[in-house]
């Protein structure tokens, strides 16, 4: 009689110099594990509680400015340096790894510095101010490398990703070549003042601007006229292009919301980001294009997933004032904010993420917990713990008031629809409600 037997050597699954880890043979048949879901739910609940317990997003406050920080810029290829401009005309370059000032120009401009940006190919950077000048700076000198003079106050500046061109906004959108003293192109379409201008990072010849006449305008450097103009119900303060989806951009609006548009079809938004209780002053995408950070006049920073309508996290401190500028770091790990209290603050993008290197076991454990939280996030208790945030009393009170106002407006509209002829009061989608029209 011939008998076949299974034979397993312990050396195949035991470490050479340690006997503390042994491989366990496990049968994954669901009928043998009737309480598996209950155990996984308990682990997911504990992982969610631990995440909120260890959530400490604030890292450091970079002090040095004597006035509010009104603009910031990150270098597309240098992770360490950050450029900031303040209300007293000072421009600083920060070394984020050391949390110290690397370079500063105390009297860079006479008045407020309205915009800064970095050269993608060089270590130089540009600043513009209310003194009608554009200055190019180098870290090797305290004096500007070059100075351009404009006819009106500049409100923003952005650099082309590949060519030595940059765009400024003021009364018009002007395209400059660093080798010429006059703008090479000028675009205008009826706006009194243009607040912001941004180049598309993928379709590099496309740029967008927003003005005080509630418009968002698209331009193409290959043509002599603007492409299209979108009119909103309230003014747009800032905008940002999605770095991974060339046609999409997000606009920060005065009505407390941010709107994501596809530039090929701008008659309705593809997403509306809510939760702020005051005007949104700045917006920026993460390098992956999956998340958006916003800074608001209500003294809070919110992080949104690009395809969701409500924020996944909100950051605030007791001493932080109005947020004028926010940036996502190029390694997708940090968020930087500049506020009216003259501070540049550094935050973790994921509040409970542990910094530093992790061994394989720890990394596997964290990934397992994340999968469990995503699997059971719809259950009431886990959802309640995951969504709960402590916010300042003023924001909580304004949020409750806003909720009552929105609900009352819906009830009034529904009552009007009930007592009117059919079709007289049409239903307007939320993503189309704040769009007045598109001109081409």
Image (cartoon, helix red, strand yellow):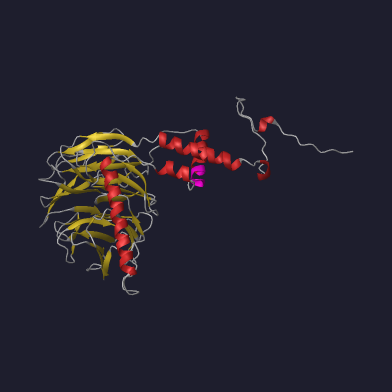
**Residue under the point 22% across and 38% down:** 343
- State which quadrant residue 258 falls in: bottom left
Vertical position of residue 240 compared to residue 329: above or below? below
Asked if residue 414 shows in the view, the reply is: yes
Q: Which one is nearer the viewer's eye here, 380 or 211?
A: 380
Furthest residue to the right? 1
Vertical position of residue 403 compared to residue 352: above or below? below
- First to last magenta residue range: 371-376
- State which quadrant residue 344 falls in: top left
Q: Which one is nearer the viewer's eye here, 38 or 179?
A: 38
Q: Position of residue 166 (x, y in %)?
A: 22, 55
Furthest residue to the front? 419
**Residue under the point 27% across and 40% down:** 393
Query: What secondary structure predominates along the stretch shown in magenta?
Result: helix
Q: Which one is nearer the viewer's eye here, 28 or 399?
A: 399
Asked if residue 354 shows in the view, the reply is: no
Vertical position of residue 350 compared to residue 238: above or below? above
Q: Position of residue 15 (x, y in %)?
A: 61, 29
**Could you tell whether 223 is left or right of 20 in the image?**
left
Q: Which one is nearer the viewer's eye here, 20 or 34?
A: 34
Residue 421 on the magenta segment: no
| Quarter of the image with the C terminus in it | bottom left
**Could you tell whether 110 is left or right of 65 in the image?**
left
**Residue under the point 60% across and 25% down:** 18
**Could you tell whether 16 is left or right of 150 in the image?**
right
How many labels sit on residues? Answer: 0
């Amino acid at each position: 009689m011939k008998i076949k037997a299974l034979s397993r050597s312990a050396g195949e699954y035991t470490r050479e110099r340690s006997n503390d880890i042994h491989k366990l043979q496990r049968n994954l048949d669901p009928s043998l594990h009737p309480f598996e879901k209950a155990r996984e739910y308990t682990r997911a609940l504990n992982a969610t509680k631990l995440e909120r317990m260890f959530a400490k997003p604030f890292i450091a406050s970079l002090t040095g400015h004597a006035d509010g920080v009104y603009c910031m810029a990150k270098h597309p290829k240098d992770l360490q340096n950050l450029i900031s401009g303040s209300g007293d005309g000072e421009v600083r370059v920060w070394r984020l790894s050391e949390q110290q000032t690397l370079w500063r120009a105390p009297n860079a401009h006479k008045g407020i510095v309205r915009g800064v940006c970095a050269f993608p190919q060089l270590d130089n950077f540009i600043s513009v101010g209310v003194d009608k000048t554009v200055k190019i700076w180098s870290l090797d000198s305290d004096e500007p490398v070059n100075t351009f003079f404009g006819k009106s106050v500049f409100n923003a500046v952005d650099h082309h990703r590949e060519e030595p061109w940059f765009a400024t906004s003021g009364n018009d959108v002007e395209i400059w070549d660093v080798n010429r003293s006059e703008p090479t192109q000028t675009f205008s379409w009826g706006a009194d003042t243009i607040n912001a201008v941004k180049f598309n990072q993928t379709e590099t010849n496309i740029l967008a601007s927003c003005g005080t006449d509630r418009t968002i305008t698209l331009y193409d450097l290959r043509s002599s006229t603007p492409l299209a103009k979108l009119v909103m119900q309230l003014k747009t303060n800032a905008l940002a292009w999605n770095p991974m989806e060339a046609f999409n951009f997000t606009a920060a609006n005065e009505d407390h919301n941010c709107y994501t548009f596809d530039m090929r079809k701008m008659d309705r938004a593809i997403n509306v980001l809510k939760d702020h209780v005051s005007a949104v002053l700045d917006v920026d995408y993460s390098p992956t294009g999956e998340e958006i950070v916003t800074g608001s006049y209500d003294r809070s920073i919110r992080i949104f997933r690009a395809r969701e309508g409500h924020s996944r996290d909100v950051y605030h401190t007791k001493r932080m004032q109005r947020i004028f500028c926010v940036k996502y770091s190029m390694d997708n790990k940090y968020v930087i904010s500049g506020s009216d209290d003259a501070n540049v603050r550094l935050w973790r993008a994921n509040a409970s993420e542990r910094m530093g290197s992790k061994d394989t076991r720890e990394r596997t454990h964290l990934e397992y917990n994340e999968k469990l939280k995503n699997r059971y996030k719809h259950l009431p208790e886990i959802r309640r713990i995951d969504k709960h945030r402590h916010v300042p009393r003023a924001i909580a009170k304004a949020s409750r008031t806003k909720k009552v106002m929105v609900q009352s407006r819906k009830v009034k509209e529904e009552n009007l629809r009930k007592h009117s002829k059919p079709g007289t009061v049409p239903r307007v989608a939320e993503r189309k409600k704040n769009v007045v029209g598109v001109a081409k």
